[in-house]
């Protein structure tokens, strides 16, 4: 690739894969305005993967407008153009809800009652409480909550601060893809986004996507949303999206295959049955590259026990049920004839490209749903070849490989992030066997000091908001909560002291994102209205100074020094990228780098002995002895595994969802699932009134289900279950399967008391989600829910 894209004027480089432009802080004088308009480039920092460029116009020392770059350069190079959310960043900065100065809580936790204090007071309280907690309980009583952390290279200063002080109780997993993470680890020894780059799909004749909605989840920027729109127009490529809901990505040539949520593994098993019956599986591939498909490839200790995936599918093992299309029809809601037709298309595809979104794996059986999607292309040997993918989320390019070093954490113990509220409530009861504690056999005590930075996952984004409120409101459990954010989100109402944060656009910053074309955006401070907000790095530095570790924390560097040093480190680690000097990257604003298209498992396919996988066997595992070994002695609950087993299931089988939360009954006759929409990334922008008016929060409901309840389109309805009640307008449609309703995630919780009951009028789906971790990953199963829907009568 030749280096030359331009927003201002093109620059010469000595590499063949890097393009950058002068998009920096250059004053422009227009013919019709007497005042010079200064252009400053910065970036969005939301947790969507885009990390898109934002172009601010500054007049008289104040930002007056925000836009972005073009979608592509004249030569076709994709550019990180911001979506509608990113273009609302200036409105966020100027919002009347901005936190302007430090606060101290004056009312009960959760009441939102605070008084203004000085920075000196705020730093002193937070630091002295931290020191007291460490002295009384030890460093393992301190926890940094999960947050999106305003993604950029210096976004996690509190982890570094805590390691300078002796460490903290750490966490693993995230809220997005814990189940897929663990399934990918055991199947491929890979990460959940280690699929082929999406550009490979253009060389396929059949693309199957399980629950992927990239035009919403990955909109903006040089991201796969733009690639998907191009693919949807391509002649000769058949695209099938398997999803309970007809999403925005089902456009052009894309076909929708509706499915009952949580049943993807049953569909794959039925496809496997049909392929086996028609002798259409690729036995050469399965016997060469895989473990556990049939007796030939089973680990020696398990041969002759009918524990292979083949025997599960044919009914010779496990539950002794043949996984025929007729069997799957009653589970998935897909006609047996359609399953056979799909299996036929898979068998005769020249190149099959299978990918998965992360919605289907956020379920009680999500580890096995994700694993089944990984198994599907293996059955026909469409892995490691041009045009194929391995059932994982598409590979995407992150140019920057370095971020603020956290240092070594002397505390060995860690917990699954989804167990945070449990670790506050009864941490001393949590063990490796019942809660996935790692690095220790058990926790010595609950979380006593919690740092909540740039996150809304204590309540709003965590399951069972009402339960979380009860736990967080009890000051005898977690004794001190430090909150750091830009606006008063729901989770921040439980903070004892609040530090007001700067947005990333308001400070020097650097981030990277993209897909096949990766990019770096180097942002300069945008002049907005400022009060007493500080950067997170400066807050952590002030606490470090108060606690006597400032030099260890900063190493004599400002945040700007760290940004430069981390960029230079990336240049040294990846010289093949040909990145420009820091000053040039800063002046250009945007640097694009080509790294695709990437083919997942290509090296393994070409030479499995020279390039073994990071699995226990070095091969693709459709039976995992490692799962049985790693989870031996774990305490299982009803619904965690196949009813015929006392261990976790070691193959990608269909496991019905939890009875109490996922199987409809007379009192709770409908399934409830969540999804992403354009109004928010998680709960970011959840307060923005314009976005809320553009994309109203509603409950999707099949028109046939609504007719049974006497509900008309637009009626306000109550969605209720054992966790709580939500009041929203109903959107009646045929674009969701019968028996299922859907509410987009991330809306801000807004509880009001009506007739002695607490009803959430904000439409937060986590008012209704069950708080129980998935069996293997101990991950977030927030799409596994049941409910009933009735007309709202105040």
Image: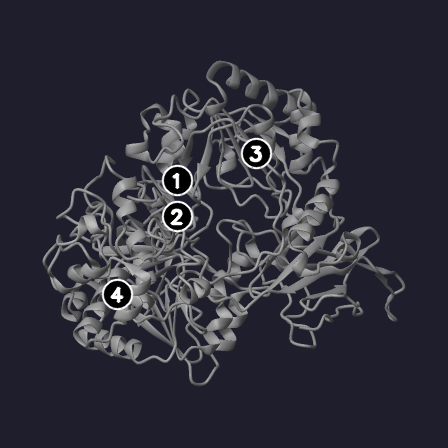
Q: CA distance from mark 1 to mark 4?
A: 28 Å
Q: Is residue 768 above or below residue 731?
A: above
Foreground disc of the pair 1, 4: 4
Q: CA distance from mark 4 to mark 2?
A: 21 Å
* Horizontal side of residue 486 vs 344, given as left or right: right
Q: Which mark is residue 159?
A: 3
Q: For numbered disc 2, what is the local secondary structure?
A: helix
Q: Which residue is mark 1?
A: 418
First of labels 2, 3 by sequence position: 3
Residue 567: % across, % down: 69, 49
Q: How many numbered discs sit on the rendered protein?
A: 4
Q: Which residue is mark 2?
A: 178
Near-viewer residue (128 or 369): 369
Q: For numbered disc 3, what is the local secondary structure?
A: helix
Residue 173: % across, % down: 43, 43
Q: Residues within 10 Å of mark 4 (few under 14, many from 20)?
A: many
Residue 343: % across, % down: 25, 75
């Amino acid at each position: 690739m030749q280096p030359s894209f331009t927003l201002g004027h093109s620059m010469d480089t000595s590499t063949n894969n890097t393009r950058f432009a002068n998009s920096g802080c250059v004053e422009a004088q227009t013919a019709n305005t007497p005042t010079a308009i200064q252009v400053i480039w910065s970036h969005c920092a939301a947790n969507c993967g885009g990390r898109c460029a934002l172009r601010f116009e500054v007049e008289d020392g104040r930002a007056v407008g925000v836009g972005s770059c073009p979608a592509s350069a004249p030569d076709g190079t994709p550019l990180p153009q911001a979506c509608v959310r990113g273009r609302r960043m200036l409105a966020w900065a100027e919002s009347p809800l901005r936190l302007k100065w430090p606060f101290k809580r004056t009312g009960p936790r959760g009441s939102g009652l605070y008084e203004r204090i000085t920075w000196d007071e705020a730093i002193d309280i937070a630091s002295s409480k931290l020191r007291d907690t460490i002295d009384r309980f030890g460093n393992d009583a301190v926890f940094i909550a999960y947050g999106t952390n305003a993604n950029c290279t210096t976004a996690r200063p509190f982890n570094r601060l805590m390691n300078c002080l002796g460490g903290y109780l750490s966490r693993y997993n995230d809220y997005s893809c814990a189940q897929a993470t663990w399934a990918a680890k055991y199947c491929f020894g890979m990460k959940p986004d280690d699929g082929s780059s999406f550009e490979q799909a253009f060389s396929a004749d059949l693309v199957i996507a399980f629950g992927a909605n990239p035009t919403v989840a990955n909109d903006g920027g040089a991201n796969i949303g733009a690639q998907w729109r191009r693919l949807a127009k391509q002649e000769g490529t058949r695209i099938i999206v398997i999803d309970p809901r007809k999403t925005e990505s089902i456009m052009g040539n894309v076909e929708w295959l509706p499915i009952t949520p949580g049943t993807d593994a049953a569909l794959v098993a039925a496809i496997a049955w049909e392929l086996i019956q028609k002798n259409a599986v690729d036995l050469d591939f399965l016997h060469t590259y895989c473990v556990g498909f049939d007796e030939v490839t089973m680990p020696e200790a398990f041969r002759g026990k009918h524990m292979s995936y083949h025997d599960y599918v044919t009914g010779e093992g496990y539950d002794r049920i043949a996984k025929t299309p007729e069997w799957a029809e009653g589970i998935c809601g897909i006609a047996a004839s359609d399953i056979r037709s799909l299996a036929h298309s898979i068998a005769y595809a020249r190149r099959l490209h299978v990918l998965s979104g992360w919605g289907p794996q956020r379920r009680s059986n999500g580890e096995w749903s994700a694993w089944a999607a990984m198994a599907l292309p293996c059955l026909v040997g469409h892995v490691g070849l041009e045009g194929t993918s391995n059932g994982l989320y598409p590979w995407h390019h992150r140019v920057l490989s370095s971020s603020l070093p956290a240092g070594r954490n002397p505390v060995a113990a860690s917990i699954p992030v989804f167990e945070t509220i449990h670790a506050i409530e009864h941490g001393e009861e949590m063990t490796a066997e019942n809660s996935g504690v790692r690095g220790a056999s058990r926790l010595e005590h609950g979380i006593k000091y919690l740092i909540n930075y740039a996150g809304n996952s204590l309540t709003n984004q965590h399951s069972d908001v009402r339960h979380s409120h009860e736990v967080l409101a009890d000051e005898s459990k977690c004794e001190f909560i430090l909150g750091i954010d830009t606006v008063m989100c729901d989770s921040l109402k439980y903070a004892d002291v609040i530090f007001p944060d700067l947005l990333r656009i308001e400070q020097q910053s650097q981030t990277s994102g993209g897909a096949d074309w990766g990019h770096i955006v180097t942002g300069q401070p945008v002049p907005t209205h400022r009060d007493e907000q500080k950067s997170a790095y400066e807050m952590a530095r002030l606490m470090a100074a108060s606690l006597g570790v400032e030099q260890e924390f900063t190493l004599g560097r400002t945040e700007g020094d760290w940004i430069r040093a981390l960029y230079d480190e990336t240049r040294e680690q990846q010289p093949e990228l040909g990145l420009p000097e820091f000053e040039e990257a800063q002046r250009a604003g945007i640097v694009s780098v080509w790294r695709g298209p990437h083919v997942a498992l290509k090296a393994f396919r070409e030479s499995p002995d020279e390039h073994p996988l990071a699995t226990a066997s070095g091969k693709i595992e459709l039976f995992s002895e490692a799962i049985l070994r790693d989870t031996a002695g774990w305490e299982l609950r009803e619904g965690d595994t196949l009813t015929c087993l006392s261990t976790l299931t070691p193959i990608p089988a269909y496991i019905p969802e939890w009875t109490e939360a996922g199987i409809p009954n007379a009192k709770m006759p409908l399934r409830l699932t969540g999804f992403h929409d354009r109004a928010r990334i998680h709960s970011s922008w959840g307060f923005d009134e314009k976005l809320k008016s553009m994309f109203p929060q509603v409950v999707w409901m099949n028109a046939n289900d609504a007719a049974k309840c006497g509900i008309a389109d637009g009626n306000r309805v109550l969605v209720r279950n054992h966790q709580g009640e939500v009041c929203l307008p109903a959107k009646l449609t045929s674009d969701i399967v019968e028996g299922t309703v859907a509410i987009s995630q991330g809306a801000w919780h807004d509880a009001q008391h009506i007739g002695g009951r607490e009803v959430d009028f904000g439409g937060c789906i986590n008012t209704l989600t069950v708080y129980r971790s998935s069996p293997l990953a101990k991950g977030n199963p927030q799409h596994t829910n049941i409910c009933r829907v009735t007309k709202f009568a105040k």
